[in-house]
Image (cartoon, grey):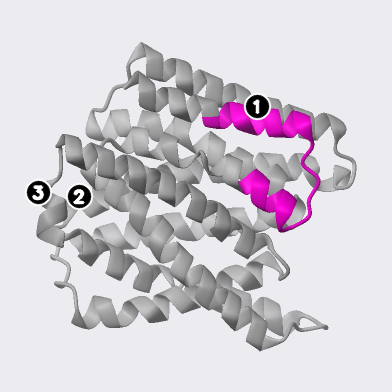
Amino acid sequence: MSAWLIGLEGTEAGHRLALGLAVMAAFLHAVFGALQKGRHDPWLSRGAIDAAYGLMAAPFALFVVPWPEPHMWPIFAGAFVIHGAYKLLQATAYSRGAYTVVYPVVRGTGPFFAVIGAWIVFGETFTPGQWIGVAVLLSGIFGLAGYNLAYLTAERDTLRSALALAVLTGMFVALYTTYDAYGIRATADPFTFLAWFFMIDGLIMPPIAFLRWRSLIARPAAGPLILRGISGGLVAFASFGAIMLATRLDKVGQAAVLRETSTVFAALIGWLVLRETVGPRRVALIALIATGAVLVEMGG
């Protein structure tokens, strides 16, 4: 399968596959965010998810895929640091703001910085039509942030800090997207990067989550938390794996922007599953973000 994927790099078939992978990653990432933000404390949820996918990835990393080349170890170390910072910021933002408040700003801010990173690192450029799409996307993001800041009252005390953390988390989304795209292109077999990444990345959050769980007076039952971790781990494999393969097959910036159609899926999940109030204005602004992503694809 690795040889087949590598053979599609830079081809029209590879572009179409990358498009499908990016949209699939968008839906699955919205599901992943809902799993982290759902009924459990987001720190505990993330710890359970990371422990699950780290343990599931270990046999593949150690016994199935080719071992990483020597130059990959510093790359994995950098990914460990970047993703650790991202997760701490994400969990803190979720602790201070509703899912439908935090998620669109995080996922919408990331593409703009990812496009810049792809230009600096990979020499990728956008057409004028694609930049119009980025502008539409950003107008939806900042319109959504402004609406939340003006009208939401349930989390007024923590809303400003939640939005600030969401923007900062979005910057780290762009950083890890660009960095991981560099990493998956630096090894001969893309599945080597994915398997070792998940195993190493799974070491960050479980100790933090365990310390937090131990400090709680009312500790949640372990069974449902473990089940959430396994479910989230499987979703993480598909979501992150899909977007990383898309960045190897096609342009990093374009894949990063298309993934942010996840904001539409996130709004539906927040409304239908988490029972959060969305409202027509916020739906329109979230749809504007998705429209910008579509214009980026059409403009290319």
Q: Mark 1 points at which residue?
A: 142
Q: Position of residue 238 (x, y in %)?
A: 39, 61
Q: Position of residue 74 (x, y in %)?
A: 25, 60
On the rendered structure, is 59 left or right of 54? left
Vertical comparison of 284 with 255: above or below: above
Distance (Cα) linking label 1 and label 3: 40 Å
Q: What stretch is highlighted in magenta?
A: 266-290
Crowdedness near tag 3: few (<14), some (14–19) or many (≥20) residues, C-alpha within 10 Å? few
Q: What residue type is labelled 1?
A: Phe
Residue 222: in magenta span: no
Q: Name the residue under label 2.
A: 185
Residue at 70%, 84% (x, y): give it.
214
Q: Judging from the image, what secondary structure is the residue with disc 1 in?
A: helix
Distance (Cα) linking label 2 and label 1: 33 Å
- Of callouts 1 and 3, which one flags the residue occurring earlier in the amino acid sequence? 3
Q: Which amino acid does label 2 sit on?
A: Arg
The disc placed on residue 209 is none
Vertical comparison of 223 with 79: above or below: below
- Of callouts 2 and 1, which one flags the residue occurring earlier in the amino acid sequence? 1
Residue 281: in magenta span: yes
| One can see residue 205 in this view | no
Q: Name the residue under label 3.
A: 7
Q: Which of 259 and 186 is in front in this view?
A: 259
Residue at 32%, 16% (x, y): give it.
127
Q: Judging from the image, what secondary structure is the residue with disc 2 in?
A: helix
Q: Nearer the viewer, residue 270 or 45?
A: 270
